[in-house]
Image (cartoon, rainbow, N blue to C red):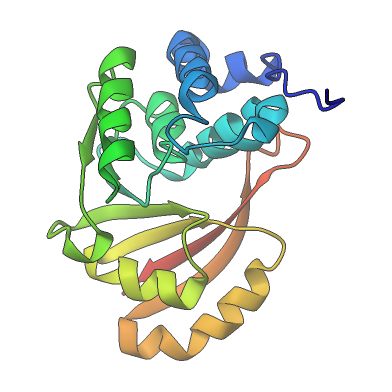
Amino acid sequence: MTDLDFTPEAEPSAAALIFADRIEAARKYTAALVRDGETYGLLGPREYPKIWTRHVLNSAVVAELVSPGQTVGDVGSGAGLPGIPMAIAQPEAEFVLIEPMERRSEWLKQTVEELGLKNVRVLRNRAEEVGEVFDVVTARAVKAMPQLLRMCVPMTKNGGEIIALKGAKAGEEIEEAKPLMKKLGIESFEIVFTGEQFLDEPTRVVRTKLL
């Protein structure tokens, strides 16, 4: 027997504010994560008690950095984080979920179809082999900034942005990446927080602007 409680988190009131009339898609997505998370190696059950705040809403609020009409490539999409919550929150942008693992990419395709997300497609490929360029490239829990930039810059349009969801050491990662600025054509780094009006712990994002 165990005293651990893996009961999925109840929907926070902020969810309806963030997703508005698209809240039902967000609910279905969250339910799919709980249903399939362990089976497909997407999320462990320990994450279920904070499934909304730590994962779904944490990702969705980053959509405020994306403009209508932009194309977004979500690298190492895995469970569809941050791409799917962002796509639900910003239906006027086009999202491509990039995932190399067959099992996960098939789950993503199935989930996108279940949710009826017309602004999302799934691409089974390694980021280095995508062969497309995007206005914005997103990444969550993929690699440290120096490695992430080497991987993402080639798939980001000139003047575009790389948006990386990061933890408390974001500043240190930026310092490690600064020597690459000239070589990779990076204009600037900026740490911003999204979702401050909705979340007790806003999402920390490193925005990398390309020349």
At 72% from the left edge and 18% from the top edge, which residue is drawn? 7
- Horizontally, residue 176 falls left or right of residue 135, namely right
Can residue 101 be seen here? The reply is: yes
- Quadrant where the N terminus sits is top right
Q: Where, quadrant-wise, is the C terminus in this rendering?
A: bottom left
From the viewer's side, name the closer residue of 166 and 61.
166
Residue at image position (51%, 13%) is 27
Front residue of 36/167: it is 36
Q: Examine the rendered structure and indicate whether residue 74 appears above or below residue 160.
A: above
In the rendered image, the residue lying farthest to the front is 1
Q: Is residue 95 visible?
A: no
Which quadrant holds residue 17?
A: top right
Q: In the image, is 173 to the left or to the right of 138?
A: right
Q: Residue at x 45, y 56 (%)?
A: 163
Q: Quadrant of residue 192?
A: bottom right
- Marks counted in the figure total 0
| Residue that protrudes farthest toward the left in the picture | 131
Residue 175 x, y percent position in the rendering: 60, 83
Q: Is residue 42 above or below residue 205?
A: above
Residue at horizontal 25 percent and vertical 18 percent from the top? 113
Query: Outermost residue toward the right?
Result: 3
Q: Is residue 129 left or right of residue 38?
A: left
Residue 195 pos. (x, y %): 64, 37
Residue 41's spot in the image, x, y percent?
Answer: 47, 38
Does residue 185 sit above or below 8 in this rendering? below
Q: Position of residue 209 (x, y in %)?
A: 40, 67
Up-down: is 88 above or below 184?
Answer: above
